[in-house]
Image: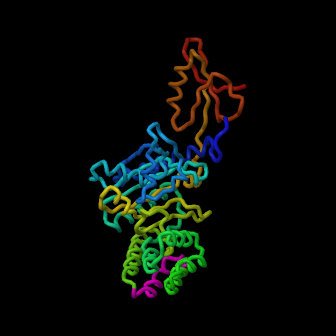
Amino acid sequence: MFLPEGSKDDIGQVVANRFKVFETFRQVALSRNYTEISTPLVEYADTFTNDHVGMSLQNMLKWFNRDGAIEVLRPDWTTSISRALTNHHMDQHKWAYHGSIFRQEIPGVESRQVGIEIVQLPALLGESECLFLAYEFLNQLQINDVIVELGHTGIFEEWVTKLNLSEEQVDRLRNAMHDKRKDEVYEIAKQNGHEKEAEVLATLVDAYGPFEMIDEYFDRWEDQPKLISILKHIKQLGMTLRNIGIEDLIIDLGRVKNLPYYTGTLFRGFLKQNGATCFSGGRYDKLYDRYQLVTSAVGIAFDVDILAEQIRPEMKMEKICIIANDETLAYAEKHRQSLTNKIVDIRYDIPKTNQYDEMLIIMKKDDNKWEVTSYED
């Protein structure tokens, strides 16, 4: 049978690597006092398409149920978990999940993720915890060449409030900023005569580089108290990360939110080897507004497939085949259990391929006892 475009079957090492990522994440999360949470694979579309979340229905895998409501395969963990937590007492602050999301714009439609969501904790504590866990998790996977990027939605939003643009113009401006289209950013921003602010926003396209560059903007924005407060927060977070050994930090002061619910600090992790994004996350306090809840919230999601590609092969275990039959099958299993730290396969037939380091066969001795000996052609 054929598969939909982009879908594929996976076999062998790639599957093993994914399980290692899942298992390692689970161990790290539990050791940091996270409670595991799982949400349904099928949800109502409105959970994700309402004004508070703002996801595009076009990009979801969807259908009409028998009552005429639109249902979708889960396209986002953060939104799904926020819905779930509003139906439970949030005495616990830290939640961990693992599983897939499904969106049309994702290669292969399915994206395997592990991640955490943190609610009702102070901003610096929650954001630091996200990146502390990331640091420990990646170290456990022996993935060390990662660059951490810090940004903040409030910088763009603060400058945009000075422009008196329509909602449609703001969306266009945000998209241009996201894509680093500097000339377009300037042209949209100056439409109502705000050339000074337009120049600042255009400059933000290039406000990307070493963490130390943040000090330059303290001088540039010394008369902008809201922006100075944001810069102080980013710097405090960065210094906290450096104090535990996260040295490879960069900033992007032109980062913009890709969904309406993001409200503050944003972060991403890039692999030095190829620039792939292995994790991303940020603050989303506004997401709970839909449920009339006022709370702090921050989270981080890891791309399991990207991380699985970086897993180093483990030391090869010796592979043994025991050739048995109906009469010797139970004895073969008992002997298999005695062979520790080895891969042992019980078969009736003689393997046609030389995939085993050793082959054993069970023979009956004269005194009606069984004996395991090496098989030779």
Colour mapping used in the image: rainbow
Quarter of the N terminus within the rendering: top right
Percent coordinates x, y for residue 78 in the rendering: 42, 55
Give the image location of residue 199, x and y in percent: 53, 84
> Image point 52% across, 20% down: which residue?
330
Quarter of the figure with residue 120 = bottom left
Residue drawn at point x = 57 percent, y = 44 percent: 15
Please say whether residue 357 is one of the residues in the magenta stretch. Answer: no
Judged left or right of residue 352, residue 132 is left
Left or right of 97? Residue 315 is right
Residue closest to the far top = 367
Compared with 181, 46 (above or below) is above
Task: Specify the segment rendered in magenta.
Answer: 206-223
Picture layout, residue 361 above or below residue 203: above
Asked whether 218 falls inside the magenta stretch, the response is: yes
Q: Nearer the viewer, residue 109 or 361?
A: 109
Look at the image and tell me in which quarter the C terminus lies.
top right
